[in-house]
Image (cartoon, grey):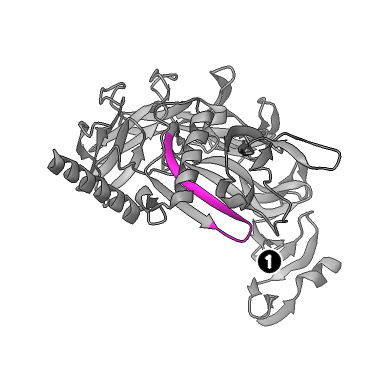
Amino acid sequence: MKLKTLLFIGFFLLLLSSFSQQKNDYRPISEMNSDEKEMYNILQKSVMALLNNKPTAKLFPVFKIYEDKKGFIFSSLIYDEPNFETHDEGSSSATYVVSLHFTKRIEPKEYEIAGESGHSYGNGSGNSNGNIKKKTHIEYYLAVEYSKSNFSFQDQTLLSAKKSKPYFDNKFTKVKFTKSNGGNFVNPLIYKIDKSDYVSYVDSEIAIYKKDGLFGIINNKNKIVFPFKYKSIRMYKMGILVQEDKTYNFIDKKGKKISKNYDKVEVNFNQYFDSVLDCFKVKIGEKYTLVNNNFEEKLPLIYDKITFFPYKNILDRLLLERDGKKVIFDIAKWEETNLVFDKIQVIDDKEMIVEENGKSGIVDYTGTVILPLEYDSINYLTNYSSDGILLVLTKNNKNALYANKKFFTEFDYDSMISFHSSIKIEKDKKYGLMDAKGKIILPIAYETIEYNKKGKKIEATKNSEISYFEFNELYKK
């Protein structure tokens, strides 16, 4: 019996040592002094008070201390409800850092017995000369405050404790509890995982980690739930996504398969995923669809691409591609719109460039035609004016400048390209410069126009002679 006890103690210390080496800022509780033990106990009671005595909300057998001139922070770790990651490359986590933040007492005064974290209470009566006849026992109180939100300006009392002597020699005036998501830490009391193994997710029930180059899952009894033979295993709110070779599917915490096989899974195909669309994108064969958290397919399996389409700065539409066509899909109505074209490009939150049968035009998001589909091409310039995004429209091999329902030029130019803060224009193999309003600021008379980076000037060649100009001079004319 003694031998078994010694072996258990040795194994426990080894686990703590491994944790300490893996996360070197945390130390095993065996190293705590008396004050730290009391802080650990208060922290555990605070956690239980916050989580209504949840059985799994027990502190890890580790602690961490940070101290500066103003305060003292005592921290440990717990498992709680997972914070599920919605990004494909992110990581879900059920580990939380819980801390007590002690505010140090500044220049204590002799008459003080206790501050906010150690109020004393007692009753007594005296005669007219001030001599006390009777004195009751003094009790010292400690109140742990907590804010539900980082944006809250009002704390609530999470825990109140008392004893017959001052807490921590009356060194602190205030104690505040905090809880924040803290990555994926392994509790050595639960899991036997080597410190060199990469852990992608762990909670009070399972641990997902990489062993010998492949992922697997064990439960809190250290039994293998899913064998270590998978290229990737990731935890999401809809389940555990496993990848074997090029095939994906979801399982539950017991290893049971809960979805069909997919060729590709994109949990978050847009950064605003959660607030817009409670679905994720999957590929089956060569086609894509959207699947909800119950793994029901919400779109027919006919689309070659599915992306979000910005509409009035709100992501409430999808841009789908099928049969060589681009289709705008209304999320609220959950149906395709009549906006179906060969190509679609966003101009702003009101209009878009569309192409059909080799001809381009501009329509708004209701389908109203702004410019008919009669232009050979419509392209962006990198310049931006007070009138909005500048576009170059091409018709019969000639170009014109356009922005926000206005033409600034006729179709007079062989080419128009952005040139720093201006537009370089070409006509009959001669070049000049134009501003964003279509005003010519350098005549179309030069064989070449380049920008001299060293001299920070425009370098224009005419009849083999080079002339230099500065932008500010041209704009003054």
Give x and y (percent) for residue 457: 70, 76
Residue 461 forms part of the magenta stretch: no
At a point 38% along the width and 41% down the height, the residue shown is 60
* Residue 240, placed above or below residue 299: below
Q: Residue at x 77, y 68 (%)?
A: 442
Q: Which residue is mark 1?
A: 431
In which quadrant is the N terminus drawn?
A: top left
**Residue 401 appears left or right of 207:** right
* Residue 379, horizontal then vertical, whole percent: 61, 47
- Going by the picture, which residue comes out furthest to the bottom? 465
Viewed as shown, does residue 305 lie left or right of 386?
left
Q: Element under label 1?
A: strand
- In which image quadrant can residue 417 be found? bottom right
| Residue 176 shows in the view | yes
Q: How many marks?
A: 1
Looking at the picture, how far across and down is residue 473, in whole percent?
82, 72
User: Foreground residue, 270 or 202?
Assistant: 202
Image quarter of residue 222: top left
Residue 165, by quadrant, is top right
Between 388 and 282, the one lying in front of the other is 282
For the residue marked with disc 1, what is the amino acid?
Answer: Tyr
Name the residue: 44% across, 28% down.
Answer: 280
Q: Decide which of 170, 401 is in the foreground and name it.
A: 170
- Relative to 383, is 11 above or below? above
Residue 454: x and y in percent read: 64, 80
The reply to whether residue 151 is in sight is no
Quadrant containing the C terminus is bottom right
Residue displayed at 66% across by 32% down: 363
Label 1: how many Cα within 10 Å (few below 14, some 14–19, many 20+): many
What residue span does the magenta drawing correspond to? 67-79
> Which secondary structure type mostly characterizes the magenta part of the structure?
strand
Q: Is residue 69 magenta?
A: yes
